[in-house]
Amino acid sequence: MEQIPILRIGDCLLVSIQVDMHDRLAMALQDDLTNKVVQTRARGVMIDISALEIVDSFIGRMLNNIASMARVLDAVTVVVGMRPAVAITLVELGLGLSGVKTALDVDKGLALIRHLIDEGEGGALDRRQE
Amino acid sequence: MAATTDVIPQILTKHENYLLGQWLAKLTASGVEVGDKTELNDQARRFVAGLRKGSEGGRPDNISGPEWADARAVLEDVSRSGTMRGATPSQIATFVFSLKEPLFELLRRENGSDAGKLAGEIWTATQLLDRLGLYTTEIFQRSREEVIARQQDELLELSTPVVKLWEGVLALPIIGTLDSARTQVVMENLLQEIVNSGAEIAIVDITGVPTVDTVVAQHLLKTISAARLMGADCIISGIRPQIAQTIVHLGVELSVVSKATMADAFALALRRLGKTITDRERKSPVKAD
Protein backbone atom coordinates (compact mmCIF):
# COMPACT_ATOMS: atom_id res chain seq x y z
CA MET A 1 0.00 0.00 0.00
CA GLU A 2 1.22 3.50 -0.81
CA GLN A 3 2.42 5.57 2.08
CA ILE A 4 3.00 9.25 2.65
CA PRO A 5 6.55 9.88 3.90
CA ILE A 6 7.07 11.89 7.06
CA LEU A 7 10.42 13.70 7.18
CA ARG A 8 12.06 15.09 10.28
CA ILE A 9 13.74 18.50 10.26
CA GLY A 10 15.10 19.27 13.73
CA ASP A 11 12.08 19.21 16.00
CA CYS A 12 9.64 19.57 13.09
CA LEU A 13 7.96 16.93 10.97
CA LEU A 14 7.38 17.59 7.29
CA VAL A 15 4.57 15.83 5.47
CA SER A 16 4.26 16.44 1.74
CA ILE A 17 1.01 15.21 0.27
CA GLN A 18 1.51 14.49 -3.41
CA VAL A 19 -1.10 11.85 -4.20
CA ASP A 20 -4.86 11.81 -4.09
CA MET A 21 -6.04 11.23 -0.56
CA HIS A 22 -8.60 8.58 0.21
CA ASP A 23 -10.01 7.32 3.47
CA ARG A 24 -7.53 4.56 4.20
CA LEU A 25 -4.52 6.72 3.30
CA ALA A 26 -5.79 9.52 5.50
CA MET A 27 -6.27 7.16 8.44
CA ALA A 28 -2.79 5.70 7.90
CA LEU A 29 -1.32 9.21 7.78
CA GLN A 30 -2.99 10.21 11.03
CA ASP A 31 -1.74 7.01 12.62
CA ASP A 32 1.84 7.40 11.36
CA LEU A 33 1.97 11.06 12.22
CA THR A 34 0.76 10.74 15.81
CA ASN A 35 3.23 7.89 16.35
CA LYS A 36 6.05 9.93 14.86
CA VAL A 37 5.22 13.01 16.95
CA VAL A 38 5.43 10.92 20.10
CA GLN A 39 8.58 9.06 18.97
CA THR A 40 10.57 12.13 17.94
CA ARG A 41 9.01 14.49 20.49
CA ALA A 42 8.42 16.90 17.60
CA ARG A 43 7.11 20.36 18.43
CA GLY A 44 5.84 21.26 14.98
CA VAL A 45 4.11 19.56 12.06
CA MET A 46 4.20 21.04 8.59
CA ILE A 47 1.84 19.73 5.91
CA ASP A 48 2.75 20.71 2.38
CA ILE A 49 -0.20 20.61 -0.03
CA SER A 50 1.39 22.51 -2.92
CA ALA A 51 0.99 19.45 -5.15
CA LEU A 52 -2.76 19.20 -4.55
CA GLU A 53 -4.97 20.73 -7.20
CA ILE A 54 -8.18 19.70 -5.50
CA VAL A 55 -8.88 19.97 -1.81
CA ASP A 56 -12.38 18.86 -0.88
CA SER A 57 -14.22 18.82 2.41
CA PHE A 58 -12.73 15.40 3.20
CA ILE A 59 -9.15 16.62 3.03
CA GLY A 60 -10.19 19.81 4.79
CA ARG A 61 -11.54 17.78 7.69
CA MET A 62 -8.45 15.59 7.72
CA LEU A 63 -6.22 18.66 8.02
CA ASN A 64 -8.33 19.93 10.90
CA ASN A 65 -8.15 16.52 12.60
CA ILE A 66 -4.38 16.29 12.28
CA ALA A 67 -4.04 19.79 13.72
CA SER A 68 -6.23 18.87 16.70
CA MET A 69 -4.33 15.62 17.32
CA ALA A 70 -0.98 17.38 17.13
CA ARG A 71 -2.21 20.06 19.52
CA VAL A 72 -3.08 17.41 22.07
CA LEU A 73 0.48 16.14 21.74
CA ASP A 74 1.80 19.70 22.20
CA ALA A 75 2.86 20.28 18.61
CA VAL A 76 1.74 23.09 16.34
CA THR A 77 0.50 22.35 12.83
CA VAL A 78 1.02 24.60 9.82
CA VAL A 79 -0.43 23.95 6.38
CA VAL A 80 1.76 25.39 3.63
CA GLY A 81 1.73 25.85 -0.12
CA MET A 82 -1.98 26.11 -0.79
CA ARG A 83 -2.71 27.21 -4.34
CA PRO A 84 -4.88 30.30 -4.98
CA ALA A 85 -7.52 28.25 -6.80
CA VAL A 86 -7.67 25.78 -3.92
CA ALA A 87 -8.03 28.59 -1.40
CA ILE A 88 -10.92 30.10 -3.38
CA THR A 89 -12.65 26.73 -3.67
CA LEU A 90 -12.32 26.04 0.05
CA VAL A 91 -13.74 29.46 0.92
CA GLU A 92 -16.62 28.96 -1.50
CA LEU A 93 -17.30 25.62 0.20
CA GLY A 94 -17.42 27.46 3.52
CA LEU A 95 -14.30 25.73 4.82
CA GLY A 96 -12.10 28.36 6.39
CA LEU A 97 -9.88 25.75 8.13
CA SER A 98 -10.07 28.01 11.15
CA GLY A 99 -8.32 25.48 13.39
CA VAL A 100 -5.20 25.33 11.24
CA LYS A 101 -2.33 27.78 10.89
CA THR A 102 -1.22 28.50 7.33
CA ALA A 103 1.87 29.81 5.58
CA LEU A 104 2.75 30.53 1.98
CA ASP A 105 5.67 28.12 1.56
CA VAL A 106 7.86 25.69 3.49
CA ASP A 107 10.36 28.41 4.34
CA LYS A 108 7.74 30.72 5.86
CA GLY A 109 6.08 27.72 7.47
CA LEU A 110 9.27 26.79 9.33
CA ALA A 111 9.67 30.38 10.50
CA LEU A 112 6.04 30.40 11.70
CA ILE A 113 6.48 27.12 13.58
CA ARG A 114 9.63 28.47 15.21
CA HIS A 115 7.75 31.60 16.21
CA LEU A 116 4.75 29.66 17.54
CA ILE A 117 6.96 27.34 19.60
CA ASP A 118 8.86 30.29 21.06
CA GLU A 119 5.60 32.09 21.72
CA GLY A 120 4.28 29.04 23.53
CA GLU A 121 7.25 29.24 25.83
CA GLY A 122 6.67 32.94 26.32
CA GLY A 123 10.05 33.99 24.98
CA ALA A 124 9.67 35.36 21.50
CA LEU A 125 6.47 37.24 22.12
CA ASP A 126 8.07 39.47 24.71
CA ARG A 127 11.09 39.96 22.51
CA ARG A 128 8.95 41.01 19.56
CA GLN A 129 6.85 43.46 21.45
CA GLU A 130 9.78 45.38 22.80
CA MET B 1 -50.91 41.25 -48.90
CA ALA B 2 -49.03 39.92 -51.90
CA ALA B 3 -45.40 40.96 -52.08
CA THR B 4 -45.40 42.75 -55.42
CA THR B 5 -41.83 43.79 -55.74
CA ASP B 6 -41.50 44.21 -59.48
CA VAL B 7 -42.50 47.87 -59.54
CA ILE B 8 -40.09 49.11 -56.91
CA PRO B 9 -36.88 47.91 -58.63
CA GLN B 10 -38.23 49.34 -61.89
CA ILE B 11 -38.72 52.71 -60.32
CA LEU B 12 -35.36 52.56 -58.62
CA THR B 13 -33.67 51.90 -61.95
CA LYS B 14 -35.64 54.40 -63.99
CA HIS B 15 -35.77 57.35 -61.63
CA GLU B 16 -32.63 56.80 -59.59
CA ASN B 17 -31.22 60.30 -59.98
CA TYR B 18 -34.55 62.03 -59.40
CA LEU B 19 -35.15 59.92 -56.30
CA LEU B 20 -31.68 60.62 -54.93
CA GLY B 21 -32.09 64.37 -55.50
CA GLN B 22 -35.47 64.47 -53.76
CA TRP B 23 -34.30 62.29 -50.92
CA LEU B 24 -31.17 64.33 -50.21
CA ALA B 25 -33.25 67.50 -50.28
CA LYS B 26 -35.62 65.95 -47.76
CA LEU B 27 -32.76 64.84 -45.57
CA THR B 28 -31.27 68.32 -45.53
CA ALA B 29 -34.66 69.92 -45.00
CA SER B 30 -35.53 67.65 -42.10
CA GLY B 31 -32.91 69.51 -40.11
CA VAL B 32 -31.22 66.32 -39.09
CA GLU B 33 -27.60 66.81 -38.25
CA VAL B 34 -25.84 65.20 -41.20
CA GLY B 35 -22.13 64.65 -41.33
CA ASP B 36 -19.99 65.16 -44.36
CA LYS B 37 -22.04 66.08 -47.47
CA THR B 38 -20.05 63.91 -49.85
CA GLU B 39 -20.16 61.01 -47.38
CA LEU B 40 -23.94 61.35 -47.16
CA ASN B 41 -24.28 61.44 -50.96
CA ASP B 42 -22.16 58.35 -51.23
CA GLN B 43 -24.14 56.53 -48.56
CA ALA B 44 -27.45 57.49 -50.18
CA ARG B 45 -26.31 56.25 -53.58
CA ARG B 46 -25.04 52.98 -52.15
CA PHE B 47 -28.25 52.51 -50.19
CA VAL B 48 -30.46 52.99 -53.29
CA ALA B 49 -28.26 50.50 -55.15
CA GLY B 50 -28.53 48.04 -52.28
CA LEU B 51 -32.28 48.57 -52.12
CA ARG B 52 -32.62 47.80 -55.82
CA LYS B 53 -30.49 44.69 -55.56
CA GLY B 54 -32.43 43.50 -52.54
CA SER B 55 -35.88 44.16 -54.01
CA GLU B 56 -34.95 42.48 -57.29
CA GLY B 57 -33.69 39.25 -55.75
CA GLY B 58 -35.01 38.99 -52.23
CA ARG B 59 -38.32 39.25 -50.43
CA PRO B 60 -39.26 42.62 -48.98
CA ASP B 61 -40.51 40.98 -45.78
CA ASN B 62 -37.20 39.33 -44.92
CA ILE B 63 -34.31 41.74 -44.92
CA SER B 64 -31.94 39.29 -43.23
CA GLY B 65 -31.52 37.35 -46.50
CA PRO B 66 -28.26 37.45 -48.48
CA GLU B 67 -29.85 39.68 -51.18
CA TRP B 68 -30.10 42.52 -48.68
CA ALA B 69 -26.46 42.28 -47.56
CA ASP B 70 -25.47 45.47 -49.45
CA ALA B 71 -28.34 47.51 -48.02
CA ARG B 72 -27.56 46.24 -44.53
CA ALA B 73 -23.88 47.09 -44.91
CA VAL B 74 -24.74 50.69 -45.84
CA LEU B 75 -27.09 51.00 -42.86
CA GLU B 76 -24.41 49.66 -40.53
CA ASP B 77 -22.06 52.25 -41.95
CA VAL B 78 -24.62 55.04 -41.49
CA SER B 79 -25.41 53.94 -37.97
CA ARG B 80 -21.77 53.76 -36.98
CA SER B 81 -20.82 57.15 -38.37
CA GLY B 82 -23.98 58.61 -36.84
CA THR B 83 -23.12 57.20 -33.44
CA MET B 84 -19.65 58.67 -33.65
CA ARG B 85 -21.14 62.09 -34.44
CA GLY B 86 -23.39 61.72 -31.42
CA ALA B 87 -26.64 61.41 -33.38
CA THR B 88 -29.71 59.98 -31.68
CA PRO B 89 -31.29 56.72 -32.88
CA SER B 90 -34.27 58.61 -34.33
CA GLN B 91 -31.96 60.90 -36.30
CA ILE B 92 -30.20 57.86 -37.72
CA ALA B 93 -33.51 56.15 -38.56
CA THR B 94 -34.63 59.32 -40.33
CA PHE B 95 -31.99 58.51 -42.93
CA VAL B 96 -34.23 55.65 -44.08
CA PHE B 97 -37.65 57.07 -43.28
CA SER B 98 -37.14 60.27 -45.28
CA LEU B 99 -36.91 58.12 -48.41
CA LYS B 100 -40.58 57.29 -48.06
CA GLU B 101 -42.03 60.53 -49.38
CA PRO B 102 -40.13 60.69 -52.70
CA LEU B 103 -40.55 56.95 -53.23
CA PHE B 104 -44.30 57.09 -52.63
CA GLU B 105 -44.58 60.01 -55.00
CA LEU B 106 -42.89 58.02 -57.73
CA LEU B 107 -45.11 55.02 -56.99
CA ARG B 108 -48.16 57.25 -57.37
CA ARG B 109 -46.88 58.55 -60.66
CA GLU B 110 -46.36 55.02 -61.98
CA ASN B 111 -49.65 53.54 -60.76
CA GLY B 112 -51.77 56.67 -60.75
CA SER B 113 -54.70 55.07 -62.54
CA ASP B 114 -54.95 51.90 -60.45
CA ALA B 115 -55.81 52.79 -56.85
CA GLY B 116 -55.83 49.18 -55.64
CA LYS B 117 -52.44 48.42 -57.05
CA LEU B 118 -51.05 51.71 -55.72
CA ALA B 119 -52.20 50.88 -52.19
CA GLY B 120 -50.54 47.46 -52.44
CA GLU B 121 -47.26 48.90 -53.66
CA ILE B 122 -47.20 51.57 -50.98
CA TRP B 123 -47.89 48.98 -48.30
CA THR B 124 -45.00 46.84 -49.53
CA ALA B 125 -42.67 49.80 -49.71
CA THR B 126 -43.60 51.15 -46.29
CA GLN B 127 -43.13 47.74 -44.68
CA LEU B 128 -39.74 47.41 -46.29
CA LEU B 129 -38.52 50.85 -45.26
CA ASP B 130 -39.86 50.43 -41.72
CA ARG B 131 -37.87 47.24 -41.35
CA LEU B 132 -34.74 48.88 -42.69
CA GLY B 133 -35.27 51.87 -40.39
CA LEU B 134 -35.67 49.64 -37.37
CA TYR B 135 -32.55 47.81 -38.42
CA THR B 136 -30.51 51.00 -37.94
CA THR B 137 -31.88 51.26 -34.40
CA GLU B 138 -30.89 47.67 -33.76
CA ILE B 139 -27.36 48.38 -34.95
CA PHE B 140 -27.24 51.47 -32.76
CA GLN B 141 -28.30 49.50 -29.72
CA ARG B 142 -25.90 46.66 -30.45
CA SER B 143 -22.94 49.01 -30.69
CA ARG B 144 -24.00 50.66 -27.42
CA GLU B 145 -24.17 47.30 -25.70
CA GLU B 146 -20.71 46.41 -26.96
CA VAL B 147 -19.38 49.64 -25.48
CA ILE B 148 -21.09 48.95 -22.14
CA ALA B 149 -19.76 45.40 -21.95
CA ARG B 150 -16.25 46.57 -22.71
CA GLN B 151 -16.44 49.31 -20.11
CA GLN B 152 -17.68 46.87 -17.49
CA ASP B 153 -14.71 44.61 -18.14
CA GLU B 154 -12.32 47.53 -17.95
CA LEU B 155 -13.91 48.77 -14.76
CA LEU B 156 -13.54 45.36 -13.20
CA GLU B 157 -9.86 45.29 -14.06
CA LEU B 158 -9.16 48.88 -13.16
CA SER B 159 -10.88 48.97 -9.84
CA THR B 160 -9.05 46.10 -8.17
CA PRO B 161 -5.38 46.95 -7.97
CA VAL B 162 -3.11 45.17 -5.52
CA VAL B 163 -0.35 47.49 -4.31
CA LYS B 164 2.87 46.49 -2.64
CA LEU B 165 3.51 48.83 0.29
CA TRP B 166 6.58 47.18 1.74
CA GLU B 167 8.46 43.93 1.48
CA GLY B 168 5.82 41.48 2.67
CA VAL B 169 2.96 43.99 2.92
CA LEU B 170 0.26 44.30 0.26
CA ALA B 171 -2.58 46.82 0.10
CA LEU B 172 -5.89 46.16 -1.59
CA PRO B 173 -7.91 49.35 -1.92
CA ILE B 174 -11.45 48.40 -2.83
CA ILE B 175 -13.44 51.07 -4.66
CA GLY B 176 -17.16 50.58 -5.20
CA THR B 177 -19.59 47.95 -4.04
CA LEU B 178 -18.45 44.35 -3.68
CA ASP B 179 -20.71 41.94 -5.53
CA SER B 180 -19.92 38.29 -6.08
CA ALA B 181 -18.38 38.83 -9.53
CA ARG B 182 -16.05 41.51 -8.21
CA THR B 183 -15.20 39.50 -5.11
CA GLN B 184 -14.04 36.73 -7.39
CA VAL B 185 -11.74 39.09 -9.31
CA VAL B 186 -10.49 40.78 -6.15
CA MET B 187 -9.77 37.42 -4.53
CA GLU B 188 -7.93 36.05 -7.56
CA ASN B 189 -5.82 39.19 -7.90
CA LEU B 190 -4.96 39.27 -4.20
CA LEU B 191 -4.06 35.58 -3.94
CA GLN B 192 -1.94 35.69 -7.09
CA GLU B 193 -0.10 38.72 -5.75
CA ILE B 194 0.46 36.96 -2.42
CA VAL B 195 2.07 34.08 -4.30
CA ASN B 196 4.15 36.41 -6.47
CA SER B 197 5.44 38.63 -3.70
CA GLY B 198 5.40 36.20 -0.79
CA ALA B 199 3.53 38.75 1.29
CA GLU B 200 2.60 37.93 4.87
CA ILE B 201 0.24 40.81 5.53
CA ALA B 202 -2.52 42.19 3.32
CA ILE B 203 -4.30 45.43 4.16
CA VAL B 204 -7.82 45.53 2.75
CA ASP B 205 -8.86 49.17 2.55
CA ILE B 206 -12.59 49.81 2.27
CA THR B 207 -12.52 53.61 2.20
CA GLY B 208 -14.03 53.50 -1.28
CA VAL B 209 -16.84 51.09 -0.41
CA PRO B 210 -20.01 53.16 -0.05
CA THR B 211 -21.98 50.78 2.15
CA VAL B 212 -21.21 47.60 4.03
CA ASP B 213 -24.24 45.38 4.41
CA THR B 214 -24.32 41.71 5.33
CA VAL B 215 -23.64 40.60 1.75
CA VAL B 216 -20.64 42.89 1.31
CA ALA B 217 -19.31 41.87 4.72
CA GLN B 218 -19.66 38.22 3.78
CA HIS B 219 -17.72 38.80 0.57
CA LEU B 220 -15.10 40.69 2.50
CA LEU B 221 -14.71 37.88 4.99
CA LYS B 222 -14.48 35.35 2.17
CA THR B 223 -11.58 37.26 0.66
CA ILE B 224 -9.90 37.48 4.02
CA SER B 225 -10.20 33.80 4.83
CA ALA B 226 -8.91 32.85 1.37
CA ALA B 227 -5.87 35.05 2.02
CA ARG B 228 -5.46 33.41 5.41
CA LEU B 229 -5.44 29.97 3.77
CA MET B 230 -2.53 31.21 1.68
CA GLY B 231 -0.71 32.13 4.86
CA ALA B 232 -1.29 35.90 4.77
CA ASP B 233 -2.87 37.85 7.61
CA CYS B 234 -5.40 40.51 6.72
CA ILE B 235 -6.06 43.89 8.30
CA ILE B 236 -9.17 45.84 7.36
CA SER B 237 -8.72 49.58 7.19
CA GLY B 238 -10.65 52.63 6.12
CA ILE B 239 -13.77 52.00 8.15
CA ARG B 240 -15.69 55.25 8.25
CA PRO B 241 -17.69 56.13 11.37
CA GLN B 242 -20.96 55.58 9.55
CA ILE B 243 -19.89 52.15 8.35
CA ALA B 244 -18.78 51.19 11.86
CA GLN B 245 -22.31 52.04 13.04
CA THR B 246 -23.97 50.07 10.22
CA ILE B 247 -21.79 47.03 10.90
CA VAL B 248 -22.78 47.01 14.55
CA HIS B 249 -26.48 47.64 13.85
CA LEU B 250 -26.56 44.79 11.34
CA GLY B 251 -24.84 42.49 13.80
CA VAL B 252 -22.08 41.66 11.33
CA GLU B 253 -19.10 40.02 13.00
CA LEU B 254 -15.86 41.10 11.35
CA SER B 255 -13.56 38.67 13.08
CA VAL B 256 -10.37 40.33 11.87
CA VAL B 257 -8.13 43.12 13.03
CA SER B 258 -9.53 46.40 11.78
CA LYS B 259 -8.09 49.88 11.84
CA ALA B 260 -9.68 53.24 11.12
CA THR B 261 -7.13 54.40 8.58
CA MET B 262 -4.70 52.83 6.17
CA ALA B 263 -1.86 54.61 8.02
CA ASP B 264 -2.74 52.84 11.27
CA ALA B 265 -2.97 49.52 9.49
CA PHE B 266 0.38 50.06 7.82
CA ALA B 267 1.99 50.96 11.13
CA LEU B 268 0.60 47.75 12.65
CA ALA B 269 1.86 45.72 9.69
CA LEU B 270 5.36 47.12 10.07
CA ARG B 271 5.30 46.43 13.81
CA ARG B 272 4.30 42.84 13.15
CA LEU B 273 7.19 42.48 10.73
CA GLY B 274 9.48 43.78 13.45
CA LYS B 275 10.18 47.11 11.75
CA THR B 276 10.29 50.40 13.59
CA ILE B 277 9.89 53.92 12.32
CA THR B 278 11.87 56.61 14.04
CA ASP B 279 12.05 60.36 13.67
CA ARG B 280 15.41 61.56 12.48
CA GLU B 281 16.78 64.63 14.16
CA ARG B 282 16.21 67.54 11.85
CA LYS B 283 18.60 70.44 11.77
CA SER B 284 16.39 72.94 9.95
CA PRO B 285 12.65 72.91 9.32
CA VAL B 286 12.99 72.25 5.59
CA LYS B 287 11.93 69.17 3.73
CA ALA B 288 13.75 65.96 4.41
CA ASP B 289 16.80 65.01 2.32
Image (tube, coloured by chain):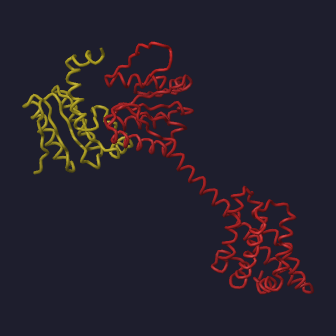
Chain colours: A yellow, B red
Left or right position of B79 against A19: right
Quarter of the view holding residue B201: top left
Q: Residue at x 66, y 80 (%)?
A: B67
* Residue placed most toward the observer, B4 or B146: B146
Q: Position of residue B90 (x, y in %)?
A: 77, 60
Q: Residue at x 69, y 85 (%)?
A: B57
Q: Residue at x 51, y 39 (%)?
A: B178
Left or right position of B2 against B184: right
Left or right position of B27 against A111: right
Residue lying at the far left in this picture: please name it.
A39
A129 over B234 or under it: above or below: above
Q: Position of residue A112 (x, y in %)?
A: 24, 29
* Residue placed most toward the observer, B201 or B126: B201
Residue lying at the far right in this picture: please name it.
B113
Left or right position of B278 against B28: left
B50 over B87 or under it: above or below: below
